[in-house]
Amino acid sequence: MATALIIAGGVGKRMGMDIPKQFILVNEKPVIIYTLESFQKHPKVDQILVVCKEGWIDTMWAYIKEYNISKVKWVIAGGSKGQESINNGVQFLKDYCDDDETVIIHDGIRPLVDELVLSDVIVKCEQYGNAVTSLPYNEQIFVKKTEDTTQQYIDRTILRRVGTPQAYKYGRLLWGYNKAIADNVGMTDSSYTNTMMVDLGETLHFAAGSDKNIKLTNTDDLALFKAYLKMKE
């Protein structure tokens, strides 16, 4: 059994919008619904928990019902930062998930996750206990010597770009968040589940990724999303 934990607690500051970016309408449909539809359609996803920005839960439920996303069983409030929102979801699932169950964590503002990527992260997690979506890094990376000079670069062949979806066995995921909070490890604004687990000594396993699986953080990303949708049509 697999449970999807969709994080939709962000705001729209970098979009310059008055509403949270997951609720922006694209072709008359909210971004979050595109995301949820991918999980609704996937045969290995059994149930969905949405962690939503506080004050928007009723709106979320209204859209879920309008678009018949029947796998969504729960919508709960998020925290003030991403890691708090994920932890809210992980703690909530204590009554609903067994230790060996797969939990897939995904950003609600990544609306173009495809079936192959989702399938691979689930299969790898079932095989190894965790899996993180990844891609090779194709740009050159240099380390700053001063503000505007450098004498050092990083071999890009040793780098991977990771994002979501990520999947973890629930028992280990719950252990990770409980320990991270107790020890004050991996719960910063820039942390995520994958970095937290590595900070706690876990070995992570790479799964397939896709360049289309973009995160909508600014208006350029939104334009790219609209272009991908037009290509699909």
Image (spheres, rainbow, N blue to C red):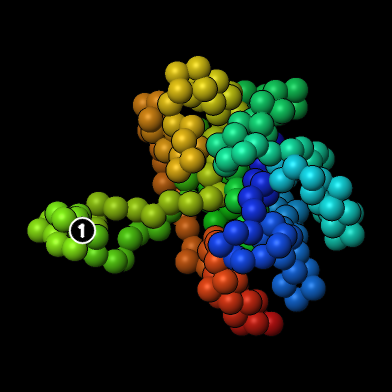
Element on which disc 1 rests: loop
Q: Is 198 left or right of 10, judged from the image as shown? A: left
Q: Reply above or below: 102 against 108.
A: above
Q: Quadrant of the C terminus?
A: bottom right
Q: Which residue is mark 1?
A: 147
Q: Position of residue 54 (x, y in %)?
A: 75, 42
Q: Residue at x 67, y 65 (%)?
A: 17
- 157 up-or-down from 125: above or below: below
Closest to the observer, 43 or 135: 135
Q: Quadrant of residue 96?
A: top right
In the image, is residue 80 above or below residue 26?
above
Q: x%, y% of residue 100?
A: 61, 26
Task: Kindly tell me whether residue 12 is visible in this rendering.
Answer: yes
Name the kind of residue labelled 1 in the image.
Glu
Residue at the spot 60% in from the left edge and 48% down from the top edge: 106
Of all residues, the one furthest to the left in this rendering is 151
x and y percentages locating residue 124 in the rendered image:
50, 43
Q: Residue at x 54, y 26 (%)?
A: 177
Q: Residue at x 45, y 18 (%)?
A: 183
